[in-house]
Image (tube, grey):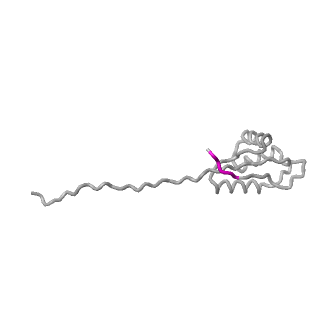
Amino acid sequence: MSDTITLPAIPKTRREEKTKRQPPYNVVLLDDDYHTFEYVITMLQQLFGHPRERGFQMAMEVHTTGRVIVLTTTKEHAELKRDQIHAFGPDLLSSKECVGSMSAVIEPAYD
């Protein structure tokens, strides 16, 4: 006889950790009558890294529809990008009295 006692195997409990995803937000650029296409394209290139062609497409969309989604991201990042748009400065190429930056808002992105 053996002095060893075998205990039944105890199932390992695995703690399920689910990563909670933050809901996405859109950064929406709003149209106005003071900023040129060149300003919009340059801003989108510098702030968002969009290629010139994509910047032109977005400039056309904001011009024709009054708004364009320029980025979908987390709320905190969307707030930062909105603030960067607001801080970009006036359009020095505009023939109109452009005294400030374009406007943007953030809104929840719905699937």
Give the quarter of the figure containing the N terminus. bottom left
Depth check: 48 or 23 in front?
Answer: 23
Secondary structure mostly taken by the magenta-highlighted segment of the chain: strand
Q: Residue furthest front?
A: 110
| Residue occupying the point 71% across, 51% down | 47
| Number of on-image labels | 0
| Residue occupying the point 85% across, 49% down | 34
Depth check: 38 or 19 in front?
Answer: 19
| Residue occupying the point 70% across, 52% down | 106
Quarter-wise, where is residue 99 in the image?
bottom right
Give the quarter of the figure containing the C terminus. top right
Quarter-wise, where is residue 4 in the image?
bottom left
Where's residue 56, x and y in %?
A: 76, 40
Quarter-wise, where is residue 10 in the image?
bottom left
Compared across the picture, whether 106 is left or right of 18 comes to right
Q: Is residue 50 magenta?
A: no
Where's residue 13, x and y in %?
A: 36, 56
Where's residue 20, x and y in %?
A: 53, 54
Where's residue 5, x and y in %?
A: 17, 59
Q: Residue furthest bottom?
A: 3
Compared across the picture, whether 44 is left or right of 3 comes to right
Q: Which range is magenta?
A: 106-110
| Residue occupying the point 80% across, 55% down | 89
